[in-house]
């Protein structure tokens, strides 16, 4: 059984594949979360995996931003300090960011972003 955030993420990709194929082809998941053993976690850290990076990136610029990063949350979860730092850093560097709790929020974030193309 998937965790609620994983289910939400699957739904996002399913929706975007139907809604906008070009955007779907330019969007990817960033698999930073999840439980890992110490050796695997150490290897991934040496390979550049960093805590707090948002869950999804739409690597497609619009008229205002270089791309869109989305952090998915569920229920009453809030972004961690590291996640907030990443979201702030990305915003300072010209990326649109969003924290979304529902598929409707993700759809709105993506459709609003794509309207600026």
Image (cartoon, helix red, strand yellow):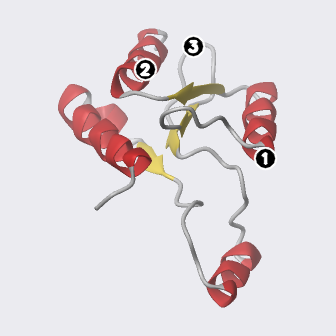
Q: Residue at x 31, y 47 (%)?
A: 10
Around disc 3, counting alpha carbons within 10 Å, would you say few (fewer than 14), some (14 to 19), or many (20 or more)? few
Mark sitting earlier along the chain (3/1) = 3
For this rendering, which residue is in front, 49 or 102? 102
The one nearer the camera, 113 or 39, is 39
Above or below residue 104? Residue 52 is: below
- What's the residue at 40%, 15% (across, down)? 108
Q: Nearer the viewer, mark 3 or mark 1?
A: 1
Front residue of 34 and 50: 34
* Residue for badge 2: 105
x%, y% of residue 80? 73, 43
**From this viewpoint, which residue is outermost toward the front?**
76
Separation (CA) of disc 1 from disc 2 = 22 Å
If you read the primary sequence from the N terminus, does the residue marked by circle 1 or circle 2 appear first? Answer: 1
The residue under the point 54% across, 65% down is 34
Residue 43 falls left or right of residue 104 = right
Asked if labels 2 and 1 touch by Cβ distance under 8 angstroms, the answer is no
- Could you tell me which residue is drawn at 65 percent across and 35 percent down? 78
User: CB under 8 Å between callouts 3 and 1?
Assistant: no
Distance CA(mark 2)–CA(mark 3): 21 Å
Callout 3: SS: loop
- Could you classify mark 1 by the number of other residues whose Cα lies within 10 Å: few (under 14), some (14-19), or many (20 or more)? some
- Residue 82 disc label: 1
Residue 61 visible in the picture: yes
> Image quarter for residue 27?
top left
Horizontal arrangement in the rendering, residue 31 relative to residue 24 (left or right):
right
Mark number for residue 63? Answer: 3
Q: CA distance from mark 3 to mark 1?
A: 28 Å
Q: Secondary structure at mark 2?
A: helix
Q: Nearer the viewer, residue 110 or 117?
A: 110
How far across and how far down the image is residue 31, in percent? 52, 60
Task: Please say if 59 is above or below 64.
Answer: below
């Amino acid at each position: 059984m998937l965790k609620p955030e994983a289910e939400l993420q699957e739904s996002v990709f399913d929706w975007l594949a139907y809604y906008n194929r070009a955007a779907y082809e330019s969007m990817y998941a960033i698999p930073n979360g999840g439980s890992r053993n110490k050796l695997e976690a150490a290897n991934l850290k040496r390979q550049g995996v960093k805590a707090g990076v948002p869950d999804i990136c739409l690597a497609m610029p619009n008229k205002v931003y270089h791309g869109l990063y989305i952090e998915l949350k569920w229920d009453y979860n809030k972004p961690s300090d590291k996640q907030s730092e990443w979201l702030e850093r990305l915003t300072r560097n010209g990326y649109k960011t969003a924290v979304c709790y529902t598929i409707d929020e993700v759809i709105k974030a993506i459709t609003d972003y794509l309207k600026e193309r």
